[in-house]
Image: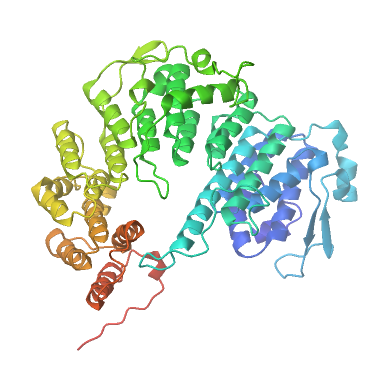
Amino acid sequence: IDELISDPTLQPDRYTINLALIPFLHAQRRDEIWHLLEKFYHSNMSSNNVKIITSGFEAFLNTLVKHGEVDFAREIFESFLLPEPMRKIRVIESKPKQRMQLSNEVKVMKLEATSYSTKDQQQQPPYGALKRPSPSTRHFNILLGGYSKSYQSALLRSKNAIFQDVNGTSNKNTLNFESRDDEAVSKPIDHLVEARKAYKLLDIMLEIGVPLDGFSLSSLMSFPSTTEQITALWKRIEPELNTDLNPAAYRSIITAYGRVGDASSASVVFEEMVRVCGNRGRSIECWNVLLGALAYRRDGEDGSEVLDVENAAASQMVKLTTGDSTYVNSDGTSNHKIAAFDNFTTDNFISLLHRKTFTEASIVILETMRNGTSIQLGTKLMQPPKPNSQTYCLVATTIANSLKQNSELALQLFQEAMDQGVTADGRFLNALLRCFGDDINGALAAWKGGIGAAAAKFEPKPNDNKQQIINRGANLLAAYNGLMHVCGRAIRPDVALRLAYAMQKTAGIEPTETTLNCYFAGKRLALSMTDEFRNFSFSMNQYESLLSVECTKYSSKDKRRAGDKKIRIIL
């Protein structure tokens, strides 16, 4: 690449530049990246190859975003693709280097004909006579997708900062995850910064008239943290969409409502999705997303709240049609419920969920799917799909999140799944075991009574494909991690340590850091519910230390320890 750059007779194409982006970034050679991009842009503009420029920058942005360089991708996007009034003038300081010498000490990149040499200016027409490349929906979507991933990563880091102590004590300076106001956050948290960048990008997108699509909406739905914010964003975006919402976009809205604890609105969106998308909105994925919305549990909730689907439906419809969620008549009465939901009857699907707890609603949906009962969605009857392993996993997760001991319900769910021929996926069995709460004896009995055998039976066989053989033991390990969570809920590190030994001796699998984290996650949950276990004897801490040793042994597959030296100690 260096030879290509140094040769003035050769022009690097988009494939060469795309391959050079990440190595040059790692080598701190950003100034040369700008030079290559400018050269690519001007050479194609002179030939009026607008499509090549557009597709080339799609590839450049995609490569940078995949490697986590979203901000640098945004700089490139704003410098080359935005309309002239919005474009940025990039100043690149070039230091003397042996690999490449730029002609000027400071290079100013102006996207105009004056940035060419005198010879180039004579050969190329003025830009006013050419059609400048405009940003497309695809360009914006790449950046929005990158901000969505950065937001999720930053949010996870912010939440983990609360639990710095491995024994479960939280940080006294609790972060306010709900605030989106600049004044409410004295020092911006990382994930809020990422959200603001995405919202500013949306402002630019709407200002220059670039249409949004389903992927745009799906990415943007990662950022709102309240029901009002989700509805306001949906209302703002919907008129700008170039097509009707597809099932993937509706699923993102359902997930967003579920994430903020508003499963009632999620149920309403599910019904609208089926009505608008028809058969495409009736797949098992769509039903599982609704169950996933029920499975969310916000901090401090115990799962005892009931769904007020009827009022949520009326409020949601008013917000999307009139823009006012507090609309009343002149006489002080409100009739928007009847006007907006004429079809709300006892046979309607969402009426089956009304006044149900999260657990009850998930069981109702599961029974509807399992029995194949035709239900009314809008004005049509629909045959629901048969449940799969993920369906049962989500129902079990909802039951586990109720924070009550539901041993009998978990065993009944397991037996029904096995009778239906559902795959004994490790994630499903993990959720089932967490339904036992702190009943460690009951969980161990269930393990010996069939759950453990079902987990082992689903492991890949020798004649399976190579990738499954590599992941051999993952299903059984996931199920064991559910037992570890129960040990944490019961504050029994002694039992957890014996389980770690049993995993290696009887099952032939090594406990991992995830196994240890599952134990401490259960312990944190137990400590947050009661002060009964605040004072531990030193022997329990010893068990936890031994458990930590067993779960963090040296592993040749751990890339973080790839550079560590192995020392053999002979006694």
> Compared with residue 315, is residue 159 higher up or lower down, i.e. above or below?
below
Q: Residue furthest front?
A: 331
Q: Is residue 277 above or below residue 436?
A: above
Residue at 73% across, 57% down: 7
Residue drawn at (24%, 75%) of the image: 537
Q: In x, y percent, where is residue 212? A: 62, 30
Q: Is residue 11 visible?
A: no
Where residue 451 appears, x then y in whole percent?
Answer: 15, 47
Q: Nearest the camera: 115 or 554?
A: 554
Q: Work out which quarter of the rendered image holds the C terminus and state it.
A: bottom left
Residue 557 seen: yes
Q: Which residue is farthest bottom?
A: 571
Give residue 499's position: percent from left, percent from top. 17, 63
Check the image and report above or below for 547 versus 235.
Answer: below
Left or right of 358, for residue 472 = left
Q: Position of residue 224 (x, y in %)?
A: 55, 41
Q: Nearer the viewer, residue 222 or 523?
A: 523
User: How are the colours assigned in the image?
Assistant: rainbow
Front residue of this view, candidates 525 and 154: 525
Location of the N terminus by quadrant is bottom right
Where residue 270 sits, quadrant-wise, is: top left
For the point 27% across and 71% down, which residue is it? 544
